[in-house]
Image (cartoon, grey):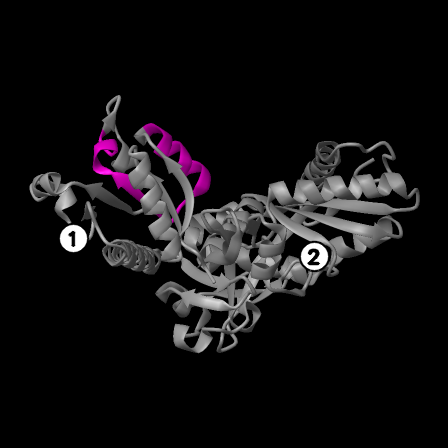
Amino acid sequence: MFTRKILVVEDEKILASNIISSLQKLGYYVSEITNSGEEAIKKVAETHPNLVLINICLAGEIDGIDVADIIQNHFHVPVVYLTEYSESKKLQKNQLSEPFSYIVKPFIESDLHFAIEMSLHKHQSKKMLMLHEEKERLRAIINSMGCGVIVTSANGCIQMMNPIAELITGWKQSEALGKNLVEVVKLVDKDIGETIGNLATYVIEAGEVVNLPENCILITKDGKEIALGDNVAPIRDQNGHITGAVLVFQDITKRKQTEAQLIHNAFYDGMTALPNRVLFLDRLRQTIERSKRKSDYYFAVLFLDLDGFKEINDRFGHGIGDDFLVAIARRLESCLRGWDTVARFGGDEFTILLEDIKDITDATNVAKRIQDSLGLTLNLNGYQLSTTASIGITWNFSNSNYDEPATVLRDADIAMYRAKRQGKATYTIFS
């Protein structure tokens, strides 16, 4: 059976002895007895009593410090004052006039017992009220947060969900209460294609905050996939013991889409949707490195400039000109293998990277297919349009010392201008 610990603060030895005897008869355990307010504070800190029974004369200020105030408000221990009848009348004019906060000497054991129990009951009720108010305040804060919040118990089962969490997961709190977290929050790591286990259980065991994986996907109640971000953290009580976990998360689908769009914009031409100069140079750099590791790995670069595109722009306008370039981009793609790269290098210039070719014939065959394809008439807004191209070709067999993409492009560009000078609508191999 739990025995309540009482600290007695009384400087009258006989009275203190009688009080201790009465307390023991009533079933209380007297943890300490002291005769000064200063010593009382030390004993409270050391023994953590359930209640302090203190002579009103020893409960005042010591060097500007209110003994009773520290015991009640700092250590959160209830205090019952021992006072004479004459002193009790003074109490009615200050904060100590609260019912059951003091007992007048001399007193009988039943009065002492009643005063102690009522004080403990009041203290417990106050604690419960404060705890309830704190929980309600915490609930209001969580419910007003702009991200999803799910609180679990120490065994990883759901105790609370806020409205945003309900909205994102598709689960109502009433449905989710008591369920294992993984039943409600089904997560998949898209990078490795694996289901993620109960993160609440993991952080409780690890005792540390865990961030959700970079490409974390939530499978909602109705089967939708939502990109999630944020973390799971252990919940600790005032003694540092882990009592559960809190998952804080938000739908980052739009952010992921924006990031993907920014990446796409950085590496692809906005009009034709072909790789741009940056991406082409990166792929060419990787191809050069690959050719250095394999002596029989050949590649070719074609530098292509449309013949007469300026006249199309001037005659039919930039709108038709842009549509024409988009159509040309699709035709160029159709002339290549799936692993080759065609990029818009700028204006009406395009570059093509042919990887893993047998010899230069593979590159010249592609150049011929491109010329044949470009020669077919295009119908754009009622206009019948066609074009040709001047194409420069270089490949790594012609210069086994290619180390930089810029050098490869320079040689292909030189070859393209030679083709222009030869009358256009043709290709030239750099040598």
Cα gap from disc 2 to disc 1, whole angstroms: 99 Å
Given residues 26 and 163, the one toward you in this image is: 26
The amino acid type, in three-letter code, at marker 1 is: Pro
Asked where in the image residue 196 lies, by quadrant, the reply is bottom right
Q: Quadrant of the C terminus?
A: top right
Q: Residue furthest right?
A: 295
List x then y, in percent, for residue 97. Answer: 13, 46
Above or below, comparing residue 325 to residue 85 in the picture: below
The amino acid type, in three-letter code, at marker 2 is: Ile
Above or below, comparing residue 275 to residue 412 in the picture: below
List x then y, in percent, for residue 105. Answer: 19, 45
Q: Which mark is residue 158?
A: none
Answer with left or right where residue 350 lies relative to residue 311. right
Q: Which residues are magenta?
A: 38-60
Above or below, comparing residue 127 to residue 53 in the picture: below
Res. 18 visible in picture: yes
- The residue under label 1 is 99
List x then y, in percent, for residue 56. Answer: 21, 37
- The residue under label 2 is 370
Answer with left or right where residue 384 lies relative to residue 20. right
Looking at marks 2 and 1 on the same chain, the residue that comes earlier in the sequence is marked by: 1
Given residues 425 and 97, the one toward you in this image is: 97
Answer with left or right where residue 282 lies relative to residue 62. right
